Amino acid sequence: MRSSRPKTPVTTPETREPRVHVYGNVGVEIRMVGDGMDVCGWAKTLNTGGMSIVSDERFPANVECEFRLNFIDDGDAIDGHGWVVYANGNGMAIQFDNLPEPHREIIRGYVSRYTVCA
């Protein structure tokens, strides 16, 4: 594991993959690396680069974590590694770190269901 959160390229709404609201459809279990503290919640927004989470408990920013996404509609689950980007009174945001392409494809498929076409 790394000692600090990796830098990611700056993205804009035009350059990042779609991010959608999936609250209530993707359960999240997160474990702080090195501490073993667990937090559970629901993904609020999700894309292949990360997610925001609604949870009663939070980790501080820049904490390394491991997570499991439980896709309620499909019964799929993926495990990954990431970093807390920020935490506030409602939850926290996680930046994914080197998510394998098969996991990214699962997320893309799930996100495509929630993307609203104008």
Image: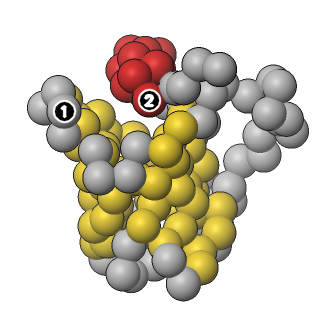
Query: Quarter-wise, where is residue 109 in the image?
Result: top left
Rendering coords of residue 37 (x, y %): 31, 76
Rendering coords of residue 57 (x, y %): 38, 82
Q: From this viewpoint, which residue is outermost toward the front?
A: 118
**Residue 59 in view, yes or no:** no
| Residue type (three-letter) at the residue carrying disc 2 | Tyr
| Residue type (three-letter) at the residue carrying disc 1 | Asp
**Residue 58 in view, yes or no:** yes
Say whether residue 65 is left or right of residue 74.
right
Say whether residue 34 is left or right of residue 52.
left
Say whether residue 56 is left or right of residue 115.
left
Residue 90's place in the image compared with 6, above or below, is below
Q: From this viewpoint, which residue is outermost toward the left?
A: 75
Residue holding disc 1: 73
At 29% from the left and 34% from the top, the residue drawn is 78
Residue holding disc 2: 114
Residue 3's place in the image compared with 50, above or below, is below
At 38% from the left and 52% from the top, the residue drawn is 23
Say whether residue 30 is left or right of residue 11.
left
Name the element at disc 1: loop
Foreground disc of the pair 2, 1: 2
Rendering coords of residue 114 (x, y %): 44, 29
Name the element at disc 2: helix
At 78% from the left and 46% from the top, the residue drawn is 7
Q: Distance between the residues labelled 2 and 1?
A: 12 Å
Rendering coords of residue 62 (x, y %): 64, 67
